[in-house]
Structure formats: structure tokens, C-alpha cells
Amino acid sequence: MNLNKFNWNELWRQQAAMQQDPFALEMVKRRHASGSKSPMGLLDCTLLYALTRWRKPMVVVETGGFLGMSSAFILKALADEHLSTSKLHSIEWMEDCPHGSLIPEELRSGFVPMRGKVEDFIAKGALPKRVDMFLHDSSHRRAHMLMEYEYFWDRMSDGDV
Ligand SMILES: C[S@@+](CC[C@H](N)C(=O)[O-])C[C@H]1O[C@@H](n2cnc3c(N)ncnc32)[C@H](O)[C@@H]1O
């Protein structure tokens, strides 16, 4: 991301506005009702929302999709920017996880759930060749994080986030 081109004031304005938005309040309620222990808090999710609106990505990849708290905010930002052809590839390996179950129905058209391990998708070459936006939220082991960062960095350009 080139910080010289970045409008921080607009980013904070959008993040603050989303924190008061009925969508965010509804998502917090859904997460609470699911009993999820996802560490993705309102601050993280609303920042993710504002960054997505700023970047207007065509291709997003997130690792560690889980119930879809982060996914929902990315998809909401894509919808609010009218990016109807953009896709969110969300990777989750846990077999018994209702992957993306928190995502509201009307935001699901751009959601591409991928069940399996990030490293297996990488080995199979099954991920998009170009990525405009990447969110790491899978295993937080150092070696795994570095592996993901190195892989996705090579698929991103200046201005991507
Ligand atoms: C912190 S949670 C993700 C929370 C999610 N982003 C949200 O907003 O609710 C981490 C998830 O990463 C998944 N995970 C861990 N290692 C993984 C791997 N190597 N490949 C795919 N998913 C993985 C776990 O199963 C877990 O559901």
C-alpha cells in the first residue's frame, strides 16, 4: 500500500461511521448469538470495511474465514461500492465449521468459500493469480504467517492492501 496516496481522514471517517451503522450492530448481535469467540472485534471489522471501500478490489483473498465476521464486512464494503463482480475467496480448513454462516443472505453473491488448508491450495495452484486485497487470519504461527505473506506479496502490486 502506498501511504502517500492514502486519505487517512476519509478512512477514519468511514470507519467511525460504520461503527454506528445498523449493519455493524446487527453483525455484532449475530456473532454474539452464534457463541463465536472470533477475536475480530468491531474496530478490526470497521477498519477492514473502510480499507475495502478505499481499495475497491476486484479480487480479495482471506485466510481463516471461520463463521464470516471479517467476510461480512468485506462483502458489505464491496456492495456499498457497487462492485457487483468482485469476489472474496475465503479459505477455511476446519471440516465442522459452518463457514461464512454469519454473512447476511443479500451479500453472498461475491462469496467464494474454499474448504481446505491454505498451504494445500497454494501447492495445487488453486488460488487467484492476482490479488488486490489480502487478509491473513488463519494460523498465527510465525512460519505459517511468513509463508502466506511471501506467497500473497508476490501476487500483489503497489497500491494493493
Ligand atoms: C481467528 S479464526 C478466523 C476468524 C474470522 N476471520 C472471523 O472474522 O470470524 C482462524 C481460523 O483459521 C482457520 N485456519 C487455521 N489454520 C488454517 C490453515 N492452515 N488453512 C485454512 N484455515 C486455517 C481456523 O480453522 C480458524 O477457523
Image (tube, rainbow, N blue to C red):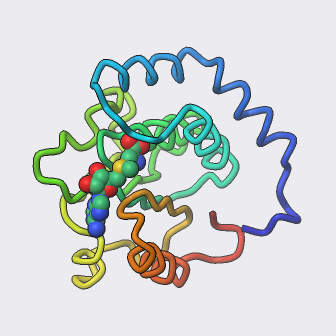
Depth order, front residue of 82/49: 49
Pick the front one: 4 or 86: 4
Q: Is the N terminus in the top left, top right, bottom left or bottom right quadrant?
A: bottom right
- Find residue 64 and report its horizontal and vertical position in percent: 35, 55
Image-quarter location of ligand 1: bottom left
Q: Nearer the viewer, residue 154 or 42?
A: 42
Q: Residue furthest left?
A: 96
Whether residue 20 sits left or right of residue 132 in the image: it is right
Furthest-front residue in view? 141
Left or right side of 143 for 112: left
Question: Residue at horizontal 65%, vertical 27%?
Answer: 18
| Res 93 seen here | yes
In this rendering, the answer to whether 90 lies above or below 128 is above
Where residue 37 appears, x then y in whole percent?
A: 35, 35
Q: Is residue 124 above or below residue 24?
A: below
114 vs 82: above or below: below
Q: Position of residue 19 (x, y in %)?
A: 64, 24
Name the quadrant of the C terminus: bottom right
Name the residue: 45% across, 17% down: 26
